[in-house]
Amino acid sequence: MKIASLSPEQAPPISLPLRFFAVAPLFLVLAALLLVTSGGNPFAELRSPAQVAVTHHITLGFMAMVMLGAIQQLLPVVIGSTMPATRWVAWFTFLPLIAGALSLSAGFLLGRPELLNLSWGLLGLTFLVFIAASLASLARAEAKNATKIAIMLAIFSLAGAVTFGVLLAAGYANGLALPYARLATAHISLALGGWVLLLVIGVSYQVVPMFQLTPNYPKWMTAWLAPAIFAALLLNLVLLLPEAAPRWTAFVAEAIFWLLAVGFAAVTLRLQSQRRRRIPDAPLSFFRLGMVSLLVAALLSLAALAFPDAGDLLRTLSALAFLLGFALSLIQGMLYKIVPFLVWFHLFRGGVKTGVPNMKEIILEPWMWRHLWLHGSTLAAALLAVWWNAAVWLAALGLLLQGVLLSYGIFTGIAVYRRTLRKIEQTSTGGSP
């Protein structure tokens, strides 16, 4: 993708995505505080209240906050179709998402049914508004490319994940007789395997060649990968039904999903090895760490299928590698590219031609490298915490510092944007003779 192919006239105000990006790191700080105050070891205690609360601070509070903000910028600029009622959609996703994520985590942690009931109402509103606006935007977009298809399938997956999540929250709050284990599996599968992975794939088709200066993804991959992953997820869902199929069919369906994920990670790493610029780049290294983590998550899950006696341990490690290693690495690395790009892009969009800082000058590279090393250490501590309780403190400290570092980087970008605009306005009004 070339920058010239973007649609700058369609872009929403820069304040729209930046408000999502600015709030998101605070949820990493909250997740860190929960890890050290909830007692026990959330990394080793599957489905404990603390583990559920920490997970949703990361997935809803941080990841979804960033992803919803990014898509509201991405659809108009890359796909070429604005969202209906842009400002209303932004506020009706931003505020309910914050309140819903906080009330859901608090409801699980404190065992308060009223908070769980509040949370599913708020989060249902958030995602109903977002999904409806996104699908309306995609439906009227003239573009017919792999990114549009992958984003649409990601949003369909999000709709399913939200549906199952609302059922789970309402069920826990009101004591409903539901198949909780199957619903939880479906919820996690669609949220991480569908919404997160498919969105990353769709965005990667654009940002990897543009920002990382690599060759384009192969046409066979862009044509078939996202639909194949979505089909594998649907097959997995069908096989979750009671006595729907023999055990070996579920084994095959899950193996297909992970092998497709391996293919995406391997091709991305190969393209990155062919990039035109060989200068070390911190956001690119975040991306590479994410792809390696996706390979590790896939191998661990495939090993869990082959060795069911160690399945719980292997799946826990796979989930950590996917969530903290793959998703968190890519989102943070992309933020370090997206925020400087937005600052540069919106200054040029506003007609500014001189005095605009280079993208490398907006968030300094040494800051990103420090964050990368901290993130790698946090990931290692989280994996160790499955066996070693003391590592929980190291993982919590790492998450807290990452939230602080990322906040500083994002607010630095905002400050550069405001400072540059102010300087340009002063020059144009009082600096000329």
Image (tube, helix red, strand yellow):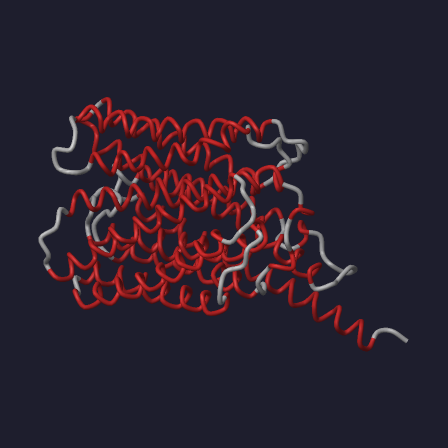
**Is 136 in front, or is 211?**
136
Query: Residue 206's image quarter?
Result: top right
Q: Quarter holding the N terminus?
A: top right
Left or right placement of residue 336 versus residue 112 in this view: right
- In the picture, measured across the screen, residue 152 lies left or right of residue 111, that is right
Residue occupying image coordinates x 21% and y 57%: 169
Relative vertical location of residue 293 with respect to residue 340 in this rendering, above or below: above
Q: Position of residue 293 (x, y in %)?
A: 41, 34
Residue at x 50%, y 57% (from the top left corner): 72
Q: What is the quadrant of the C terminus in the image?
A: bottom right
Rendering coords of residue 321 (x, y %): 36, 37
Q: Position of residue 311 (x, y in %)?
A: 21, 30
Q: Is residue 391 above or below residue 256?
A: below
Say which quarter of the image contains residue 109.
bottom left
Taking the spot 41% from the left edge, 35% from the top edge, the residue there is 227
Pinpoint residue 26: horizontal percent, then vertical percent: 42, 60
Outermost residue to the right = 433
- Give the number of callouts: 0
- Kindly identify the residue that appears in the image at 78 percent across and 59 percent down: 353
Q: Nearer the viewer, residue 423 or 208?
A: 208
- Residue 302 against residue 428 in the figure, above or below: above
Question: Which one is nearer the viewer's eye here, 367 or 59?
Answer: 59
